[in-house]
Amino acid sequence: MENKLAIVTGGSSGIGAEFARQLAQKGYDLLLVSNQPEALEAMKVEIEQLAPEVTCNIMNQNLATADAAEMVMNRCREIGKDPEVLINNAGIFTFKEILDHDERYIDLYINLHVATVARLCYTVGKMMREKGHGYILNMSSMSVWMPMPTIGFYASTKAFIRVFTRSLHYELRDHGVKVMVACPGGLATDLFGLPKKWQKVGVAIGALTSPHAFVKGALKRLFKGKKQYVNGLFNRISIVAVASLPTWFIMWAKHKILEKIKR
């Protein structure tokens, strides 16, 4: 049988690369989209060695542009396949107060985390609804329950992804299309600038989840039709605990801890 196609945005590194590996091992041809051309080429070589029976297509594309979703779909047409799986994983993270950002970050966050995610889901979702089958996974974050100082752009745009995806889950459920939002916390990746040494320590003591374990759990739940995935009991407890913090404590943390980290 011909392999089905899976799109993974941000598929050149981190969680996106792990999605690519595990989907390839499940027999999916891939379209990996990223703005890191050298890392994409390296992933293509890795996938071809890991799963010789699949085809790994790569696309060097800035996903924070107005036409990014259209360009991705044009590439699917060139490949000659409609996607059966869409993983919206591409994202950015900055640790800075909202008004201290350069103004260009307003468009960068909104285009990457909101507009392109929505447009890809809109176009691919219509295809899947017509066929009566498909899977969409959008990566949000545990930070959506934690509107803390210095992560305002990140948390608020990831909150859009969560609400949007939950709505899409219910709308496409009767049409055989499974849609899930993943809200990870404590992952051992380079997104937050944590050195590799401390990533390994975090995994060893159970404070962080490895990309392999997270993606395995996320795909398992996606294919079962779950609507949301938050990895780890500790993270699920933390959502309630952090959301209950009083303002005085958050301001103390801002002054005593966050400002030291910024320096």
Image: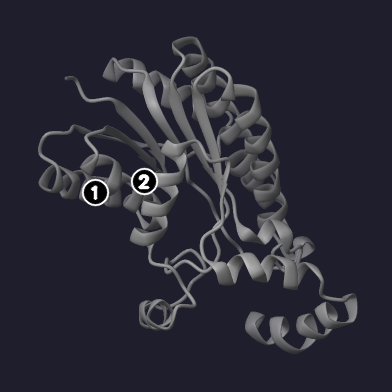
Residue 186, relative to residue 24: is it above or below?
Answer: below
Image point 68% across, 32% down: which residue? 167
Residue that label 2 marks: 11
- Residue 149 seen: no
Residue 24, relative to residue 14: is it above or below?
Answer: above
Image x and y of residue 213, in percent? 37, 61
Image x and y of residue 24, in percent? 24, 40
Image point 39% across, 43% down: which residue? 34
Mark 2 or mark 1, which has the lower sequence index? 2
**Local SS, label 1:** helix
Q: Quadrant of residue 8?
A: top left
Image x and y of residue 157, in percent? 68, 48
* Quarter placement of the N terminus: top left
Residue 172, relative to residue 218: is it above or below?
Answer: above
For disc 2, the neighbor class at 10 Å (few under 14, some 14 to 19, many from 20) is many
**Local SS, label 2:** loop
Residue that label 1 marks: 43
In the rendered structure, the answer to whether residue 242 lies left or right of residue 209 reads: right
Image point 38% across, 66% down: which residue? 210
For disc 1, the neighbor class at 10 Å (few under 14, some 14 to 19, many from 20) is many
- Between 48 and 93, the one lying in front of the other is 48
Image x and y of residue 230, in percent? 56, 57
* Quarter placement of the C terminus: bottom right
Q: Quadrant of residue 74?
A: top left
In the rendered structure, the answer to whether residue 56 lies left or right of residue 59 reads: left
Image point 60% across, 43% down: which residue? 113
Q: Amino acid at mark 2?
A: Gly
- Residue 120 seen: yes
Distance from the alpha carbon under mark 2 to that under mark 1: 8 Å
Q: Are marks 2 and 1 in contact (CB under 8 Å)?
A: yes
- Between 119 and 228, the one lying in front of the other is 228
